[in-house]
């Protein structure tokens, strides 16, 4: 990456319920606490990230930036707005459904995080998303976006939860440190805040942030 350019990180999954917005907001919080300038762009019509931000307790800005038209002019305007964001890191929360915004996030991102749970359906969804990102990367001819698979909402009391990282190596993409299923994570967002910086969950999100930084430095 060239110095001074914002690093664009997309959160994408064709399957819902995998913690995409939760990861986007808590990753942003870790990066912001480190002194980085961070902006989250909510491209999902569901608007979950923007709704959390409205409670006023996040240490960074969340801006809705929807793209609901496929016309070239609309896509070009949206892309210009993303790339013109004044920040060190821009985190894009993509919609779960395939469409103009989903594809646009993949087209502009330097790195795409793909959250995935431990169930068979979650892993199938992650495999589908990985395939879509690879096709976008090939079509774009720029060698990006890079991919980082993120085990999410992992219940380590189950066999699938304990084995999920090993299982995900079958996707043949880098796998990030896992994010454990904890009530405290959901509770914090309900009050408009990221997890406490001293909590076990914050340590996991910090490990994810470090993995993200490493991937971006290698681009």
Image: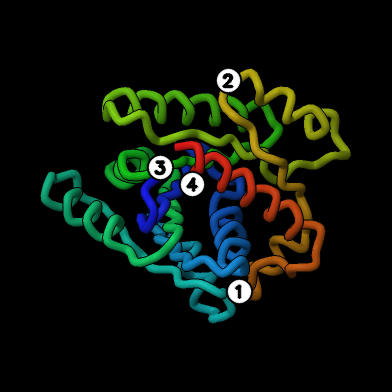
Given contact means CB atoms under 8 Å apart, are the residues at marks 4 and 1 in contact? no
Identify the element where label 4 is drawn: strand
Q: 10 Å neighbourhood of mark 4: few (<14), some, or many (≥20)?
A: many
Q: Is residue 55 above or below residue 169?
A: below
Residue 198 position in % (x across, y down): 80, 67
Q: Which residue is mark 3?
A: 110
* N-term-proximal mark, 4 vs 2: 4
Front position among marks 4 and 2: 2
Q: Is residue 10 above or below residue 84?
A: above
Q: Which residue is mark 4?
A: 11
Numbered mark located on residue 192 in the image: 1
* N-term-proximal mark, 2 vs 3: 3
Alpha-carbon span between mark 2 and mark 3: 19 Å
Numbered mark located on residue 172 in the image: 2
Q: 10 Å neighbourhood of mark 3: few (<14), some, or many (≥20)?
A: many
Question: Would residue 82 be found to the left or right of residue 73 on screen?
Answer: right
Alpha-carbon span between mark 4 and mark 1: 19 Å
Given contact means CB atoms under 8 Å apart, are the residues at marks 2 and 1 in contact? no
């Amino acid at each position: 990456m060239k110095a001074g350019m914002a690093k664009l990180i997309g959160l994408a999954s064709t399957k819902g319920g995998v913690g995409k917005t939760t990861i986007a907001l808590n990753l942003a919080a870790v990066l912001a606490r480190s002194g980085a300038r961070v902006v989250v762009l909510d491209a999902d019509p569901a608007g979950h990230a923007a709704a959390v931000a409205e409670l006023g307790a996040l240490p960074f800005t969340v801006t809705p930036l929807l793209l609901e038209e496929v016309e070239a002019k609309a896509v070009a305007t949206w892309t210009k707005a993303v790339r013109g964001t004044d920040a060190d890191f821009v985190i894009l929360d993509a919609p779960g459904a395939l469409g103009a915004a989903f594809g646009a996030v993949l087209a502009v991102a330097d790195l795409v995080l793909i959250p995935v749970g431990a169930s068979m359906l979650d892993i199938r969804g992650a495999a589908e998303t990985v395939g879509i990102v690879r096709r976008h990367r090939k079509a774009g001819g720029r060698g990006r976006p890079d991919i980082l698979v993120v085990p999410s909402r992992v219940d380590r009391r189950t066999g699938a939860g304990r084995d999920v990282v090993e299982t995900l190596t079958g996707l043949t993409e880098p796998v990030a440190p896992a994010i454990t299923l904890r009530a405290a994570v959901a509770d914090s967002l309900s009050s408009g805040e990221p997890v406490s910086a001293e909590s076990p969950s914050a340590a996991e999100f910090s490990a994810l942030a470090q993995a993200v930084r490493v991937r971006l430095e290698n681009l």
